[in-house]
Amino acid sequence: GIQVEQSPPDLILQEGANSTLRCNFSDSVNNLQWFHQNPWGQLINLFYIPSGTKQNGRLSATTVATERYSLLYISSSQTTDSGVYFCAGDQGAQKLVFGQGTRLTINP
Amino acid sequence: EPEVTQTPSHQVTQMGQEVILRCVPISNHLYFYWYRQILGQKVEFLVSFYNNEISEKSEIFDDQFSVERPDGSNFTLKIRSTKLEDSAMYFCASGRDLQETQYFGPGTRLLVL
């Protein structure tokens, strides 16, 4: 099965900073999603982005499918952005394979 | 906006007991999933379900696990005889189609003592 690698594993920033999180896949994927896991453990959908670029407020994501990676950008970070960010992909087998996550801490 | 719901939010059980975790997927979705996350680890796929049968399952999903869609709205995960290592957050997810977003519920935190 595919392997999903996320970097960096941990990121600590001051409020207002920008950040880039990366997700690499060992093979091509049909589906790709980014999630934010909040302090209560809930997985919040951020993007469904198997290819191309999408933006939602201060967040945007870009997937370069041919090179098997995706990037999540967070601009003007707020303390509420803290948590763990996961990317996950599947190859049409109906099972998302998750990365280990990037733990983002935004300090006031 | 429609969302996936799960009950209970927390469950504590004794080793060897049976537990049933319940999910109500989004109403027009056809694909249903269970995932789990052991504390501090990544989320792992357990099983996918379509057209009233299992379409894919992981090595974790052994004979102690079963899934059921008992009516038109609920989707359940049963663990027949819980072990300590079954302690985890269990997420239900649903999707309208294979090439679309999987929407996750808020999770059930299971603690086996």
Image: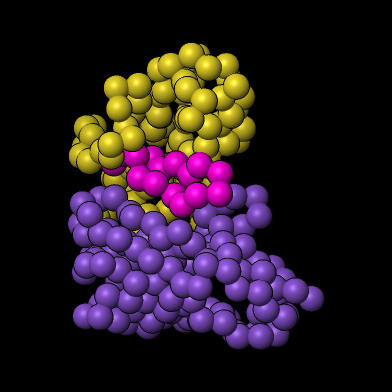
- Chain identifier of the purple chain: A
Q: Is B22 above or below relative to A33?
A: above
The answer to whether residue B100 of the structure is visible from this angle is: no
Displayed quadrant of residue B25 = top left
The structure residue drawn at horizontal position 46% and vertical position 72%, both measured from the top left corner, is A7
Q: Position of residue A76 (x, y in %)?
A: 65, 85
| Residue at far right of view | A108
Q: Name the one closer to the observer, A101 or A43.
A: A101
The structure residue drawn at horizontal position 56% and vertical position 62%, both measured from the top left corner, is A84
The answer to whether residue B106 of the structure is visible from this angle is: yes
Q: Is residue B106 magenta?
A: no
Q: Is B15 above or below relative to A54?
A: above
| Residue at far top of view | B16
Range of the magenta residues? B34-50
Q: Position of residue B8 (x, y in %)?
A: 58, 31
Q: Position of residue A43 (x, y in %)?
A: 52, 54
Q: Seen in the image, is A10 located left or right of residue B37? A: right
- Chain identifier of the yellow chain: B
Displayed quadrant of residue A88 = bottom left
Q: Is residue B48 magenta?
A: yes
Q: Name the one closer to the observer, B94 or A37.
A: A37
Q: Name the one closer to the observer, A33 or B68.
A: A33
The structure residue drawn at horizontal position 58% and vertical position 69%, both measured from the top left corner, is A10
The structure residue drawn at horizontal position 56% and vertical position 24%, both measured from the top left corner, is B112
